[in-house]
Image (cartoon, rainbow, N blue to C red):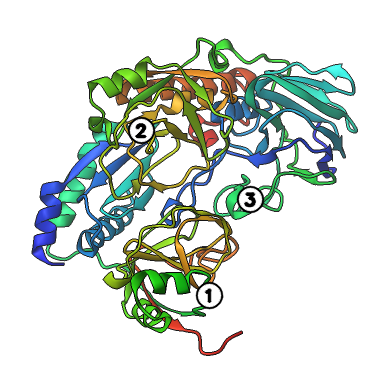
C-alpha cells in the first residue's frame, strides 16, 4: 500500500562515485551542456520499468561497487540492474534484474562488481531531487543536478518520490533481450560510419574493425580511451570543431580511439570516423577498464532498427508488469515523455 | 550576408549522419565569420520551424547538428527534410532575424601569461591589452564545457599556438587567447590557452535564466576594468 511518509535513502558509507541519473537533459547543447544522463540508459530504463516508474525517472548510478545505504521512512519497491553486483539487503543476498520490496530501515550493501561498470538502483516513486535545466541527473563538471551537483557522500539523504498508487506486479524478472550480453571477452559493439568516415582509408577501416581494443584505466563518464595498435599512423586532416555526441569514436593524434560518453563535450575537433550505435552504447559503458572490445560496422537504418526494437522491448515489459487492464496505464507515448 | 558566402555555403552544403540520433549539416570547412553567421541563421530557422522530431540544435564554426528521436522518425526522412530546409534558408532573400545581444565585459589585465604573450609577440603588455580590446568579437559557438564561448576574431598580432603544456586547473573568469580566438573560462577546468586577464563576469550559472549569459551569434567587447579590486 502507498504510504505518505517522506522516504529517503540515507548514505551510510559512500562508494567512490555514486550519482543521481536519468535519461539526460536535452535542449541545452548549444550552451555546451551535454545531455548527460545514465551511462547505460537501457539498464536505467529496465530498472525503472521493473518498479513501475516512467522509464526516464531518476535513479542512483554506481560507477564502481561499494557503499552502504539505508532506506528510511517506509518500505519500498526497488530493482538493481546493469553491472553484475554482489548486493545484500540486511545481510541476505539481493537478486539483480527483478523488483523486490524491502522494509523500512533496510540496509542495502553493494559489494564489488563482478562484471560491468555501472549499477542502477531504481525505487518506485523515483529519486525526487529538483529538476535543473530539464533533468535531475548529476553533471559533475558544472556541479549541477542530483544532490548538490556532486557525488553522494556519507550522511547525504536522497529524497524519494511518493510510491505510485498502482504498483506493478513484483518479482518479474528482466527478460533476456533486455539484459545485455555483458561484455567480453567476446563482446562486440556496433558502430556506424561517422561524419569523417571517408578520412579513413581501407587499411584504416580494417584496423578499426579488425583490432581488439582494451578499455584504458582513464575511462570515465566523459569518454573511454581505447588502447591498441594505432588505427592511423599519420595525422588525419585537421578540421574546425564540429558538433559531436555520445558514442562518437574520435581519432586524436596518436591514432588510438576515444569514444565520447554521456558527459562528453558537445563539440569537438578530432576526426570522427565512426559512431557507436545508441543500442550498444550502454554495452560499451559496461566495459570496465581492462575489458576488450571489438567493433562491428552496421548502417544507420540497422542502428535505428536495433534502437526501436529495444524501446519496444521496454514497452512490452512495462505492459506485462502493469497487466493489460491496469487503469493507470494509458499509452507508451506518455511513458516516454 | 554577402552573396558569395551564401553561394559558397550552398555549394559546400552536405548532410552526414552523426550517429543514429543526429545529423550534421556542413556549410563549409573554415573558421570565418561569414560562414558562421549562416550557421546561426540556419540554427535560428530550424528552431523557429519547431519540427516535431527535433530535440536540439547545436551550432559550431561552419556546421550545425540537429538531434532527433529515432523512435519517431528515421534518418532518411530527417536528412531529406533538413537538406530542403537548409537550402531554402540559404536561398531566401532575408535570413531569419535573430535576437542578438552585445556584451561589454570588464577585464583586469593581470593574467599570469600576459608578460609571456607580450614577449612572444614582441609587444608591450599595454599593446597586448589594447589589441585584445580592439575587436567586436562574435560568439562563434559554445562548447568544451557549459558556457565556454569561442570568441573571434582575435587581432592577428596576438595569434599564438596553445600552450605546449595545458594547465591542470584554470580558475573561472580567466580571460584567455589561443589561435584566432579568445574565451572566458566559465568553470574550473584544465586549459591550454594563454591567460591574459580575469573578469568577474561568469558566463555560466545553472540557477540563472538563461543559464548562459553568452549565446552563439552574440557580440562581445572587452574593456579594461576601471579599478583594481
**Quick one: SS at disc 3?**
loop
Report the Cα–Cα distance between label 3 and label 1: 26 Å
Quarter that holds the N terminus of chain A: top right
Query: What's the mark number on residue A145?
Result: 3
**Residue at 89% over, 20% down:** A91
Residue A120 in the image: above or below residue B48: above
Q: Within 10 angstroms of label 2, few (less than 14), some, or many (20 or more) residues? A: many
Q: Which quadrant of the figure has residue A82?
A: top right
Image coordinates of residue A210 in percent, x first then y, are 36, 15
Q: Earlier in the sequence, mark 2 or mark 1?
A: 2
* Image position of A286 (left or right of A109): left
* Residue A73 placement (x, y as % from top left): 87, 40
Q: Looking at the picture, how far across and down is residue A228, in whole percent? A: 45, 23
Q: Tell which subunit mark 1 falls on.
A: B
Mark 3 and mark 1 on one chain? no
Foreground residue, A218 or A21?
A218
Q: Closest to the observer: B82 or A242?
A: A242
Q: Residue at x 20, y 48 (%)?
A: B85
Distance in Å between CA atoms under marks 3 and 2 = 27 Å
| Residue position marked by numbered label 1 in the rendering | B199
Which image quadrant is residue B69 in?
top left
CB contact under 8 Å: marks 3 and 2: no
**Residue B53 seen in this snapshot:** no
**Marks 2/1: CA–CA distance:** 38 Å
Q: Residue at x 37, y 34 (%)?
A: A251
Residue B6 pos. (x, y %): 13, 58
| Chain ID, mark 3 | A
Circle 2 is placed at which residue position?
B19
Amino acid at each position: 500500500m502507498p504510504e505518505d511518509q517522506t522516504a529517503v535513502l540515507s548514505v551510510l558509507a559512500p562508494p567512490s562515485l555514486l550519482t543521481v541519473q536519468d535519461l539526460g537533459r536535452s535542449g541545452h547543447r548549444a550552451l555546451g551542456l551535454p545531455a548527460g544522463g545514465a551511462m547505460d540508459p537501457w539498464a536505467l530504463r529496465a530498472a525503472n520499468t521493473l518498479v513501475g516508474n516512467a522509464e526516464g525517472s531518476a535513479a542512483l548510478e554506481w560507477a564502481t561497487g561499494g557503499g552502504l545505504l539505508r532506506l528510511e521512512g517506509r518500505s519500498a519497491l526497488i530493482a538493481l540492474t546493469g553491472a553484475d553486483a554482489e548486493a545484500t539487503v540486511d545481510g541476505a543476498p539481493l537478486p539483480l534484474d527483478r523488483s523486490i520490496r524491502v522494509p523500512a530501515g533496510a540496509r542495502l550493501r553493494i559489494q564489488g562488481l563482478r562484471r560491468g561498470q555501472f549499477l542502477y538502483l531504481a525505487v518506485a516513486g523515483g529519486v525526487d531531487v529538483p529538476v535543473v535545466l530539464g533533468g535531475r541527473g548529476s553533471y559533475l563538471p558544472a556541479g549541477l543536478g542530483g544532490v548538490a551537483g556532486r557525488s553522494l557522500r556519507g550522511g547525504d539523504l536522497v529524497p524519494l518520490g511518493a510510491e505510485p498508487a498502482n504498483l506493478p506486479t513484483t518479482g518479474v524478472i528482466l527478460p533476456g533481450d533486455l539484459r545485455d550480453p555483458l561484455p567480453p571477452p567476446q563482446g562486440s559493439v556496433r558502430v556506424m560510419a561517422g561524419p569523417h568516415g571517408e578520412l579513413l582509408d581501407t587499411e584504416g577501416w580494417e584496423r578499426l574493425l579488425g583490432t581488439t581494443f582494451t578499455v584504458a584505466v582513464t575511462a570515465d563518464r566523459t569518454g573511454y580511451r581505447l588502447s591498441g595498435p594505432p588505427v592511423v599512423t599519420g595525422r588525419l586532416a585537421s578540421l574546425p570543431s564540429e558538433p559531436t555526441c555520445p558514442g562518437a569514436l574520435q581519432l586524436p593524434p596518436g591514432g588510438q580511439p576515444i569514444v565520447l560518453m554521456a558527459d562528453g563535450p558537445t563539440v569537438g575537433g578530432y576526426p570522427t570516423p565512426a559512431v557507436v550505435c545508441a543500442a550498444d552504447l550502454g554495452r560499451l559503458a559496461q566495459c570496465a577498464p581492462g575489458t576488450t572490445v571489438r567493433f562491428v560496422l552496421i548502417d544507420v537504418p540497422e542502428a535505428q532498427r536495433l534502437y526501436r526494437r529495444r524501446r519496444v522491448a521496454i514497452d512490452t515489459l512495462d505492459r506485462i508488469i502493469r497487466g493489460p487492464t491496469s487503469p493507470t496505464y494509458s499509452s507508451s507515448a506518455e511513458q516516454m515523455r | 550576408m554577402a552573396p558569395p558566402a551564401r553561394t559558397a555555403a550552398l555549394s559546400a552544403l552536405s548532410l552526414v549522419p552523426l550517429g543514429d540520433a543526429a545529423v550534421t549539416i556542413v556549410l563549409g570547412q573554415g573558421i570565418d565569420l561569414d560562414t558562421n553567421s549562416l550557421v546561426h541563421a540556419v540554427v535560428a530557422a530550424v528552431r523557429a520551424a519547431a519540427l516535431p522530431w527535433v530535440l536540439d540544435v547545436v551550432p559550431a564554426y561552419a556546421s550545425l547538428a540537429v538531434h532527433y528521436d529515432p523512435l519517431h522518425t528515421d534518418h532518411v526522412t530527417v536528412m531529406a527534410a533538413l537538406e530542403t530546409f537548409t537550402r531554402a534558408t540559404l536561398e531566401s532573400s532575408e535570413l531569419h532575424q535573430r535576437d542578438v545581444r552585445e556584451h561589454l565585459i570588464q577585464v583586469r589585465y593581470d593574467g599570469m601569461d600576459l608578460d609571456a604573450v607580450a614577449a612572444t609577440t614582441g609587444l608591450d603588455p599595454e599593446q597586448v591589452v589594447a589589441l585584445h580590446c580592439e575587436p567586436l568579437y562574435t560568439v562563434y559557438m559554445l562548447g568544451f564545457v557549459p558556457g565556454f564561448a569561442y570568441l573571434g576574431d582575435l587581432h592577428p598580432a596576438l595569434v599564438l599556438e596553445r600552450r605546449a603544456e595545458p594547465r591542470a586547473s584554470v580558475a573561472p573568469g580567466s580571460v584567455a587567447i589561443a589561435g584566432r580566438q579568445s574565451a572566458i573560462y566559465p568553470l574550473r577546468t584544465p586549459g591550454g590557452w594563454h591567460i591574459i586577464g580575469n573578469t568577474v563576469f561568469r558566463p555560466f550559472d545553472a540557477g540563472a535564466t538563461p543559464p548562459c549569459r553568452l549565446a552563439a551569434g552574440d557580440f562581445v567587447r572587452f574593456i579594461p576594468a576601471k579599478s583594481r579590486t
